[in-house]
Amino acid sequence: MVKITKEAALEYHSNGRPGKIEVKPTKPYRTQTDLSLAYSPGVAYPCLEIQQNPDDVYKYTDKGNLVAVISNGTAVLGLGDIGAMSGKPVMEGKGLLFKIYGGIDVFDIELDEKDPEKFCEAVEKIAPSFGGINLEDIKAPECFAIEERLKKTLDIPVMHDDQHGTAIISAAGLKNALEVAGKDIEKVKIVVNGAGAAAISCTKLYVALGARKENIVMLDSKGVITSDREKLTPQKAFFATDRRDVHTLEEAVKGADVFVGLSKGNVLTQDMVRSMADNPIVFALANPVPEISYEDAMAARPDVLMSTGRSDYPNQINNVIGFPYIFRGALDVHARAINEEMKMAAVLAIADLAKETVPDVVNQVYHVNDLTFGPNYFIPKPIDPRLITEVSAAVAKAAIKSGVARTEIKDWDSYKQNLRQLLGQETKLTRNLHATAAKHPQRVVFAEGENQTMMKAAVQAKQEAICKPILLGNPDRLHRLANRLKLDLTDIELIDMRADQEQGRRATYAKHLAEKRARQGYTFQEAYDKMYERNYFGMMMVETGDADAFITGLYTRYSNTIKVVNEVIGIRPEYKHFGTMHIINSPRGTLYLADTLVNEDPDTDTLADITKLSAHAVEFFNEKPVIALISHSNFGSSITVGAEKVKNAVAKVQAEYSDLTVDGEMQIGFALDKEIRDDLYPFSRLKGLDVNTLVFPNLTSARSSYKMLQSLNTDVEIIGPIQMGLNKAIHFVDFGASVRDVVNITAVAVIDAYVEKIKKNIE
């Protein structure tokens, strides 16, 4: 599990613009006409339309995509009653999750009000602004009364996610776990440890799935909740047992089929798990320390079916699997409520998704080929791209069928396609890269170890389990820098390539390089001298198998790096050149740009090689390449040397690789606007297709393009440069790259190295 320090968390929240969310305009605003339409006098017209037909508010405003995350800060993230203002970072975080997973806008609202009556009055008065209300971090039992009243008085979806989010995900998990165990939900004995909002809601949903109340035992901090206990809340009384033979958790779990923990860490012992029935189901959901660790539970009972709230173990129960998509579906039909039918639809959709054939993208993220329904996979992974389509659509359908929808969706295929486009590829790509790398961490050498950005990136990559870092540099200086930056270098290998104890390794590397480059005039002494340079030494570590990947470039001249790569690593035999690519993640989708680093003025053959390399790289990222070769000319409209070489490169690639979707030469505007391109050039092989890969005629145009995008658009995320065509996983970062940039490249390098290992094993 990633260790989060106070310093890192405070820096994250305060760096740059404080906080985690912002409001952005969605309409043009640069001209006087724009402003007149946006405000006075133009704004009067939609106001009058809404006055005549209130439902038009969904047509003319953001109400249909706007959720209020509302809290009074009385039960914040296990911190307890810390107050409304202190809970604001959590509410902003919830808003961030709504946006990146569901494309939903959020205003976080912190109400300094503990009285349920006054709290509800405040929410009711602001409700017209929103399409939905997400109640958050409100303590029990007040949260029950608040949600119940607001559901009655408001005509928009209201959900207390602390209750229902966990309930929906755990109910889906329980349904599937019981199926794996071969047990009937009507017959199983269930123990619920915890009696807060989440525990009550979870247990109610289990009953809705078919569990029998008489087979359920619930415990709170005082022990088993029995019907003869005094002063029980109505919620606890509903699940109070008439049994008098159980008082403690140890007694309750004996012979039980299911344990659900929503309490605190380390309260379930191995002996208790051993006392449970065959194929016991254990949901230890306390975070960050579960009621029993995954390792202890599996050691106690190899037949246990286990879930936790943690991402580093199978079957994670995480609210993010549910709430963004539940609200997404509710908002998209302008629902008046989130009712029981919609919640159950979400349960069934999530449960069913785990039984379907896992798409390649999920298998590749976790780098397995056998991720199938069973003991280690009965809940979908949080990054599963199908969640937004399957869960949102199921919820929307349930809203329509149950009569709470104001509008209906006619074309469900089109709806799902719109959902996929809504999120784009930005967050999904980077999440997938990191998750994939974390499944098979490799040994990565960071050349400029004494650079603070490189060191921070190496530490972060280690914390995220992306790689096993190796820092090149003087250990004393590295430790001093780490102490200054408050970074933990534990389990990070430090290598001083200039130290006396490295003489043997330098000699071995020098001998290898001298033999490899003997016909290029290399001598052993010359090669040995080069081993004092970080790029030569680090790349030789990869070349000889002492490491798997190498990251360099923060302050190394590219010309020198390229020279070393050619000497030490070499180009893949199927190519004559190598190059680099930058990935552009933007709201309109993902673009792949080449060559952005290596080939200054490529000729026809080089451009053809770059095109083939680009196709291979795009496929590496699980997309089908649709390639345009860029020029100032459109299909022969200008006869210049530059245009001719691009035209000839297109012809060469089309002739040799007829299965590739590639065309050109063309201007970049036509490449990216298929309507205009198809209208003017209907003969193009790209007709009807969205181009995702751009091959530029020279280094200047490629590099200028992505740098301009990076400078002008804050919504654009750029990953790269990513090498294409080298024999080993040698990757570069841009001068001035951020820690995030370096970590992203590290993830790519790890995946690259692992894929090469798989290929060698197959060969």
Image (tube, rainbow, N blue to C red):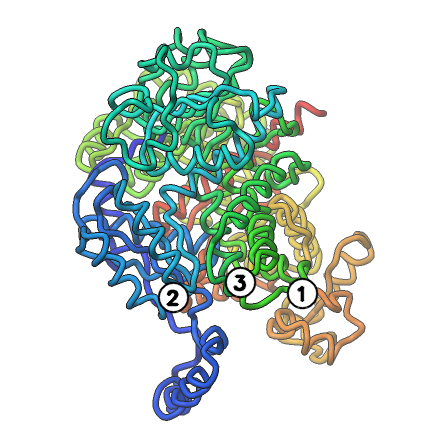
Of the two numbered discs 2 and 3 on the same chain, state the one appearing first in sequence: 2
Decide: is 641 above or below 720: below
Q: Position of residue 763 (x, y in %)?
A: 72, 25
- The quadrant the N terminus occupies is top left
Q: CA distance from mark 2 to mark 3?
A: 13 Å
Mark toward the start of the polypeptide (3 vs 1) = 3
Q: Secondary structure at mark 3?
A: helix
Q: Dot 3: few (<14), some (14–19), or many (≥20) neighbours within 10 Å?
A: many
Q: Which mark is residue 332?
A: 3
Please name whichever residue, 500 or 102, is drawn nearer the observer in this view of the structure: 102
Q: Quadrant of residue 39?
A: bottom left
Q: Which residue is mark 2?
A: 130
Q: Which mark is residue 410?
A: 1
Foreground of the two, 524 or 125: 125
Tag 2: amino acid: Phe
Q: Residue at x 63, y 38 (%)?
A: 352
Count of numbered marks = 3
Measure how far apart labels 3 and 1 are at the Cα level: 12 Å
Q: Is residue 633 left or right of residue 388?
A: right
